[in-house]
Amino acid sequence: MSEAVETLEGWWVLHDFRRVDWPRWHAASAAQRAALLSGWQTLCRELSGGPLEQAGDSAVYTVLGHKADLLFLHFRPRLEDLLAAQMAVNLDPGRPFLVPATSYVSVIELSGYLAKPGTGPLPPEVQRRLYPAIPPHRYVCFYPMNKRRQGADNWYMLSREERARLMAGHGQIGRRYAGQVVQIITGSQGLDDWEWGVTLFADDPLVFKKLVYEMRFDETSARYAEFGSFLVGTRLEPDDWPRWLNTATGDG
Amino acid sequence: MSEAVETLEGWWVLHDFRRVDWPRWHAASAAQRAALLSGWQTLCRELSGGPLEQAGDSAVYTVLGHKADLLFLHFRPRLEDLLAAQMAVNLDPGRPFLVPATSYVSVIELSGYLAKPGTGPLPPEVQRRLYPAIPPHRYVCFYPMNKRRQGADNWYMLSREERARLMAGHGQIGRRYAGQVVQIITGSQGLDDWEWGVTLFADDPLVFKKLVYEMRFDETSARYAEFGSFLVGTRLEPDDWPRWLNTATGDG
Amino acid sequence: MSEAVETLEGWWVLHDFRRVDWPRWHAASAAQRAALLSGWQTLCRELSGGPLEQAGDSAVYTVLGHKADLLFLHFRPRLEDLLAAQMAVNLDPGRPFLVPATSYVSVIELSGYLAKPGTGPLPPEVQRRLYPAIPPHRYVCFYPMNKRRQGADNWYMLSREERARLMAGHGQIGRRYAGQVVQIITGSQGLDDWEWGVTLFADDPLVFKKLVYEMRFDETSARYAEFGSFLVGTRLEPDDWPRWLNTATGDG
Amino acid sequence: MSEAVETLEGWWVLHDFRRVDWPRWHAASAAQRAALLSGWQTLCRELSGGPLEQAGDSAVYTVLGHKADLLFLHFRPRLEDLLAAQMAVNLDPGRPFLVPATSYVSVIELSGYLAKPGTGPLPPEVQRRLYPAIPPHRYVCFYPMNKRRQGADNWYMLSREERARLMAGHGQIGRRYAGQVVQIITGSQGLDDWEWGVTLFADDPLVFKKLVYEMRFDETSARYAEFGSFLVGTRLEPDDWPRWLNTATGDG
Amino acid sequence: MSEAVETLEGWWVLHDFRRVDWPRWHAASAAQRAALLSGWQTLCRELSGGPLEQAGDSAVYTVLGHKADLLFLHFRPRLEDLLAAQMAVNLDPGRPFLVPATSYVSVIELSGYLAKPGTGPLPPEVQRRLYPAIPPHRYVCFYPMNKRRQGADNWYMLSREERARLMAGHGQIGRRYAGQVVQIITGSQGLDDWEWGVTLFADDPLVFKKLVYEMRFDETSARYAEFGSFLVGTRLEPDDWPRWLNTATGDG
């Protein structure tokens, strides 16, 4: 048996992607649209720093392409808090306009490849990485991934040493992008359909392409990584909603 | 020909995942919602310990993410009883609000790898494992799986001894989580699209991640397991429905 | 080139799986439901032994899980007769309530692995297997399958002798279940998305699991079989419809 | 680099599969149905030999199973003509009743494996194969396919001689079915999701099964062919529509 | 670790494929259709050379087959500009008639296999390739692709020299089609589900088939390429909309 690596876990994370029901939106009156818009702004404020967020953080992004129009991203202390955040959207009067597109359930994970978790209290820099605020960058990129278990390319049959060596090289690429991109790794074994989620935050979306492409040449990705769908978007602050929907009113 | 392992079977099991038709819910009047809510509470009570459950057990869970909103889980003596439980939901006046999302048909299975089924009456501890009540834990995790038959990684071409050896090591990991998680294995060869279903019950959902991740390093999973979709949720007792739907009335 | 095996063909077969449009059903009045129910009972009687069945047989089953609610199974002399049976359902006034879920087009096939088809008239026992009535058993199981063509596991590159040897071992398992299960093999090369359909009939649905599981350890399945979706259900006679839909009226 | 084979191309081909919106049909009045029926008959006549067909041919088939109800098959000189034929259906008042199910875009292809295309004018028999009328047979079968590029089974890494040898053996099987089946091969590299479409025409649909099954034992298929969905149907002449829809009126 | 190749990036690109909601179109009055048509023509003019296009280019194509009816293709300086172009369609009153079918997010990419990007200003011919207008050709073809990472066929484990050699041979085929086809390669690592998009423009659509087929015999494609869906269409200028929809009015 190969030796499992220990992990540390922090916030629970829900990526809740939604589509707008545009025919319904176009059928709404101006007054209905204003009420919807105002409601969504209030909802977003309550989810991030308001009564629907006792701890953790939430942010909303507009998503490019047909896969989704919006991403509601939630960091929370407990799985129930994610359910509560999701239900806050479902019970909002604007819910009929927001159709679930896809989602991802995971938990922030620090891997023990570089340093085995000790038994004492966690150092503050580890605490900050386990319980971060959502990075403020303008662009977001999300994708899920697996480590491959296929014929001779079976990550889970490698020795712990070999895996640590590969991960170290992999991490070196990531560090070259420090300052340009913030990467949050979330584990989802037993929670969702892939083994990990990767969420990237940057002020220049070209960095997503550069980083992902360069990493693909690294043996860790080249031989052992399998990727799901990639989604990219831009931050949508509550004040941005009227401009996004081209609707004059709202509480902004 | 490889020697097949004998199995014991107990309750028939249906995982009936449903989505709420939220636009329909938002279009309902307060009176309609109260009636729906009351009806669902009654239905759940009749399915678990009431007239719709002559034997076996039923429980309802809220599910996180877009894949489903609710899981109706049924343990029953006969396949027809599962059909009856499913039809009880379909014929309930609240059915138009509950859209089938996915489902899984299986039967509780004890594998004969560790001890060949004998011919005498089953010992009480085996009876209890074949015909359990649904564990009372707050969190549930479900996923289906196959044993791989791919090139050199073909479980069904291994000798019985080799399979027993691998399963024994696999079981050791599981036992380290005894007290933290209850695992119910259900067989679905000939019944549904994967070979087994795994349903985990725990009071801390992080245990699902820890257990599944650790097991993936075991050769039984690393080389021979293929996994379907993972779904997680929390128990929804009849009394919890009003709070879940933020609706004041109901029979609670 | 590997030597193809000759086959004998009998009835054409359509597995026509349908979902009930439950919101539409719940919106119907009691009078509409009674008329629908009566119409479905008449349709089923006409399809099996009535004017819509000049030869062959039809039967209806309720299906467990989200994949379908009903299976209309038709055995007919010609492909056009299957089209006519399908159109009889489509043109029935109850059609808006019955949504196509999935289907399978195939033809009953006897394989020549064990005995090459001769040139004389077919013996009566072969005739009976090519042109059977639908077995009367209470439970049905359907799944499609392929023989694998993947790397070293390529069924169609084996010699005829090797294939005959494998099929003979495979058949021995099946014969151990004689009396417990009736198996009808239908070929669908050139007709539908898999190479064969397997339809099992039994009075105890656990036999489906036992048989499929045991066969998976046989090299024919372990190395060479690929399986599609499995669906199970129970026979629904015309007189059973009122109870199934919990509707008092009907022509029963 | 392997040597590419040259090809000759003829008619552009669209397989336009449609489902009938049966709930809409059942909701239509008798007068509406008569108008729809008459319109479809006119449309079909205009598409085949009428003003919507300057050159080429069109035919309609009823399709068995849930994948589609109808196939509109068009042979045309230019890709734009296929767009025009598709738009003729879309702009027809009966379009709301005909929902796109699937489709295939390709062009009739003669492969140069057996004889390299020369530089002179094409012989008449080649012209006839590139620009045929739709064969008049009662039954149709369509499926798309690829040549495999997988590990040791990579068609495109074979030498031209090896490919020609394999194709010659493959063609011998096809020729044994001459007189029973007409096969039209269409290329779709760069046009649709598979590399080729195969459309078979016969007066006995069992021939589709016999031919496809026998070819699967040929190394060209056994090692190198990957198949998509198979669809079968029967010719629906304009005069057949009233009987097909069990509607007395119409222009027939 | 294999050496990553450097790349240059230009316009951001969105392929926004839409289906027409034909039942809605047929239900619209003549006046509504005229207004819709006029609105779409205005929208298209604003997106290409008008106020919705500060820089870059846009074009619309009709698409053949069931996968989409229209392609809105946008080249823009920034990812936000793509979001704005997509939202211009979503907020247009004609949006309920245009249903998202699929989409692709990528950025024009010049690969450094043939010449490593230097540090000085880009030569004008490189600038033109990074920031092109949409080629004016009548036909378009789009497909996404990956480089394979499968067993012995793993592109990303090849040396930079081997990859450069393979790409050079691959490019020679493309150059034989110079003058017949314009090819724009867009990178989508980290942006969408495949690694690259390929968009071809030509005045004869048969060139798409010839080029893609010939390239498949090249080792770069034969061993290392995986392809997604192929979509083809023809340019739809604003003035072409009335004829396309067979609607007399409009602003044309």
Image (cartoon, coloured by chain):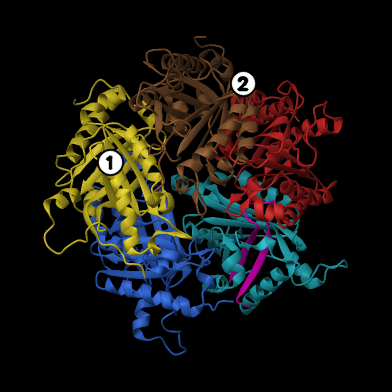
Chain colours: A blue, B cyan, C red, D brown, E yellow
Res. E17 image quadrant: top left
Q: Secondary structure at mark 1?
A: helix
Q: Secondary structure at mark 2?
A: loop
**Residue closest to the far right:** B120
Residue C141 % position (x, y): 71, 45
Which mark, by number, is residue E176?
Answer: 1
Q: Is residue E9 left or right of residue C215?
A: left
Please, which chain is the residue tagged with disc 2 on? D
* The C terminus of chain A: image quadrant: bottom left
Q: Is residue A219 left or right of residue B20?
A: left
Residue D25 % position (x, y): 51, 24
Q: Nearer the viewer, residue B58 or D196?
A: D196
Q: Is residue A186 above or below residue B189?
A: below
Q: Nearer the viewer, residue C56 or E4?
A: E4
**Residue closest to the far bottom:** A120
Residue D217 % position (x, y): 63, 41
Q: Is residue B233 left or right of residue C187?
A: left
Dot 2 and dot 1 within a common chain: no
Residue labelled with disc 2: D203
Residue at 14%, 42% in the rendered image? E51
Q: Which residues are magenta?
A: B179-203
Question: Was residue E204 drawn as part of the magenta stretch in this picture?
Answer: no
Confirm whether residue B147 shows in the render.
yes
Type of residue at label 1?
A: Arg
Q: Residues within 10 Å of mark 2 (few under 14, many from 20)?
A: some
Which mark, by number, is residue C38?
Answer: none
Confirm whether residue A8 shows in the render.
no
Question: Was residue B182 drawn as part of the magenta stretch in this picture?
Answer: yes
Type of residue at label 2?
A: Asp
